[in-house]
Each structure stands twice: as structure tokens, then as C-alpha cells.
Image (spheres, helix red, strand yellow):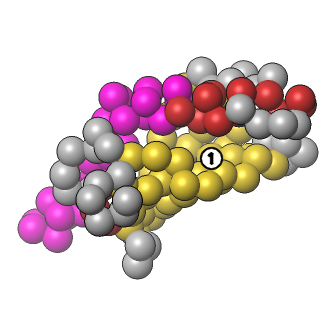
Amino acid sequence: MSVTNEISHRHQILQDLHFWARLASMMTAKFQALEEKALRRLWVDDFIPDRAIDTKYGVNVEGAAWIPSRFDFVASIPQKMLHRRRDCFCIRSFVVGEDQLTLRLEIQCQDKSTK
């Protein structure tokens, strides 16, 4: 029973609506700042996380992103963000696969140890 609770606790990020709304806003700003005009036209309406897969780094969250059509996304989220407030974070890197309608993100904590 405690294993199930721990897994559920690690995957609570799936239900953190504030986190996903902030991430959508950040990703839209990233798109608008790009030099490539085709990507500048993109924006993120919403991230809809579906499942979390534990990794050595933290978790990979998979789901759908509306950019404005449906893209499959994977967001790598560090361990530090799974058990504490998720207010201070940034998008460390991202890759858009327009042909395959995919988005891969790497999220990073922003605190004293990462500055």
C-alpha cells in the first residue's frame, strides 16, 4: 500500500493545473521568441498530461498539447519538482517535431543550486 501511495505522490504533478497552465504560457513565449517564422506562429492552448513514467532524473510526463492542433508531448521533470512547490521552473530545452506533431521538453528548477 505504501508503494502505491509513493507512486501516486510522485505523479501528483499530473493533476497540478497551475503548473501546466504556467508551462503553456512559458512555451508560448518561447515560440514567439524564435527566429524561425513558422514556429513563431505556434502557441500552446493547453497541456493535458496523461501518464508519468519514472526515470532516474525524475519523471517523463506524456500527454497531449494543443498547439493549436493536437501534438503528443513528453516533458522531462526533475526529481526536485516532484515533492515541493513548482513555482520556480523554466524550460531548459525543447524540440518541436512539426511533421510528427510532437513536442519534447526538458524542465529545470530555478533555485539557488541551479543559478
Front-most of residues 95 and 99: 95
Please tell me which residue is depicted at 89% across the width and 29% down the height of the picture: 37
Q: Considering the image in quadrants, where does the N terminus appear? A: bottom left
15 magenta-colored:
yes
Q: Main secondary structure of the magenta part?
A: helix
Name the residue: 61% across, 55% down: 93
Q: Give the residue displayed 54% in from the left and 55% down from the top.
A: 92
Is disc 1 placed on a helix, strand or loop? Answer: strand
In-image side of 87 versus 96 (left or right): left
Q: Amino acid at mark 1?
A: Phe
Image: magenta residue range: 1-25
Local packing at callout 1 (Cα closer than 10 Å; few below 14, some 14-19, many 20+) is: many
Where residue 39 appears, x then y in whole percent?
82, 33
Is there any visible trace of residue 50 in the rendered image?
no
Please provide percent x and percent y for residue 24: 53, 30
In front here: 73 or 2? Answer: 73
Q: Is 52 placed above or below 86 here?
A: below
Query: What residue is disc 1 on?
Result: 73
Is residue 31 depicted above or below 78 in this figure?
A: above
- Quarter of image, res 43: top right
Q: Quadrant of residue 81?
A: bottom left
Which x, y percent locates residue 79? 32, 65
Extreme residue toward the bottom, this view: 56
| Rendered-image quadrant of the C terminus | bottom left
**Is 5 left or right of 106, judged from the image as shown?**
left
Is residue 2 at all visible to an observer of this figure?
yes
